[in-house]
Image (spheres, rainbow, N blue to C red):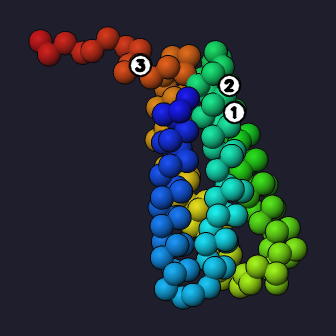
Amino acid sequence: MIGLLARLAGGPVLIIGLPAALVSGLSGQGCHLTAAAVALALILPPGVLAAWLVQRQEMSAYGRVAIVMLTSILRLVLGFGGGVALFFLCRHSLGWGPLCFWGWLLGAYLVTLTMETPVLVRLARSENGTNTRSRFPPLSSA
């Protein structure tokens, strides 16, 4: 589970966090770093939940696909719905401009989606959520 969490959360945190820290440092405004951190906090949990459920549950392939679809809807609702709520509640106190916050939120969404897709496909294709190579015997070369 720790390896799965490192793959799903570590990549997006580095890919979004390092540029946000760099832009915040160069511009002298902390709004980029806080916007990126809030965006990752809104976007990451549904993806981790999807991978954990697909890995833990013994179910058919259709059940795994249903879990991935439901958590994708949850990611959209939580990520962008929560983003709208937080943007209108906190934008003045945290100094977020529309381009700053929504740019980091969209970037976090796209990066996490790109990083999670291969992991979820690998988990969904494996038997019972374990990382087996293939369910079918290899083709003979004769």
Q: Secondary structure at mark 2?
A: helix
What is the three-letter code of the residue carrying label 2?
Gly
Task: Please say if the residues under marks 1 and 2 sit with CB atoms less than 8 Å apart.
Answer: yes
Q: Secondary structure at mark 1?
A: helix
Instruction: Kindly identify which residue carries mark 3.
Output: 132
Q: Against 112, is 61 above or below?
A: above
Residue 89's disc is: none
Coordinates of residue 48 in the picture (x, y in percent): 63, 40
Instruction: Kindly identify which residue carries mark 1.
Output: 67
Foreground mark, 3 or 2, reads 3
- Residue at (72% x, 56% y) in the render: 42
Q: Residues within 10 Å of mark 1 (few under 14, many from 20)?
A: some
- Residue at (81% x, 61% y) in the render: 82
Instruction: Kindly identify which residue carries mark 2.
Output: 63
Task: Please say if the residues under marks 3 and 1 sit with CB atoms less than 8 Å apart.
Answer: no
Which numbered disc, 3 or 2, marks the residue that appears first in the sequence?
2
Coordinates of residue 64 in the picture (x, y in percent): 63, 28
What is the three-letter code of the residue carrying label 3?
Thr
Q: Secondary structure at mark 3?
A: loop
On the picture, is 5 further left or further right than 70?
left
